[in-house]
Image (tube, rainbow, N blue to C red):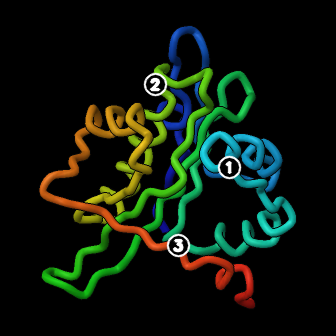
Amino acid sequence: MVSILNTSKRAEKKLKKHVIDIALLTQQDLHELAILQRELIDEEADIIRMRELLPMILQDRNYYLLRARKNGVLVGSLAAIVCHDLFGKCMPFMIIENMIVTGDERGQGIGTLLMQEAEIIAQERKCRYIALISSANRREAHRFYHRLGYRTDPYKGFKKIVGDLVSHLDY
């Protein structure tokens, strides 16, 4: 397993006189994460289901839930998933999902630190590329991703919501 976030140089960065701690998400972070997610999606978080799923996710060596804390408060998170590929040289790739930094903290470098940590993991896991999608109306987020070197051309992303089917699946 890739050893991540285990050195103070990598796990903590000082931004504008504040210490930003980037680490893997834990059970203790879930309540704050549920609140933070409301800024990303207009849907109440299922904290009970989150508590059930987190141990399984944490045991999956291809799944990285990163969180950012500023002065002890959860201010950002993202999910980074390493996927295996059977095309070309069979190199893995990474998908970034649910990237969020709380509104008051945007523009302070926190999202950049989260993405940089995901990129380090992708490099350590020998991923060929990182892909992500962002809602069309999130123009500020699009500018952020462009500044980090992510491009939409010549790509176009697609997403299909499969509705209530997911809530009826028995994991």
Q: Amino acid at mark 2?
A: Gly
Residue at the disc numbered 3: 161
| Residues at marks 1 and 3, CA–CA distance in whole angstroms | 15 Å
* Residue 42, numbered label: 1
Give x and y (percent) for residue 81.
46, 66
Give x and y (percent) for residue 117.
44, 44
Name the residue: 31% across, 58% down.
Answer: 130
Q: Amino acid at mark 1?
A: Asp
How packed mark 3 is, by other alpha carbons closer than 10 Å (few <14, some 14-19, many 20 or more), is few
How packed mark 2 is, by other alpha carbons closer than 10 Å (few <14, some 14-19, many 20 or more), is some
Give x and y (percent) for residue 105.
58, 23
In the displayed image of the protein, which residue is found farthest to the top? 17
Name the residue: 37% across, 64% down.
Answer: 94
In the displayed image of the protein, which residue is found farthest to the bottom? 170
As helix, strand or loop, the secondary structure at mark 2 comes to loop
Dot 2 or dot 3, earlier in sequence: 2
| Residues at marks 2 and 3, CA–CA distance in whole angstroms | 31 Å
Name the residue: 37% across, 49% down.
Answer: 120
Do callouts 2 and 1 mark residues in contact (Cβ within 8 Å)? no
Total count of labels: 3
Query: 44 left or right of 22?
Result: right
- Compare residues 4 and 158 and report the one nearer the observer: 158
Dot 2 or dot 1, earlier in sequence: 1
Give x and y (percent) for residue 1.
49, 68
| Residues at marks 2 and 1, CA–CA distance in whole angstroms | 25 Å
Residue at the disc numbered 2: 109
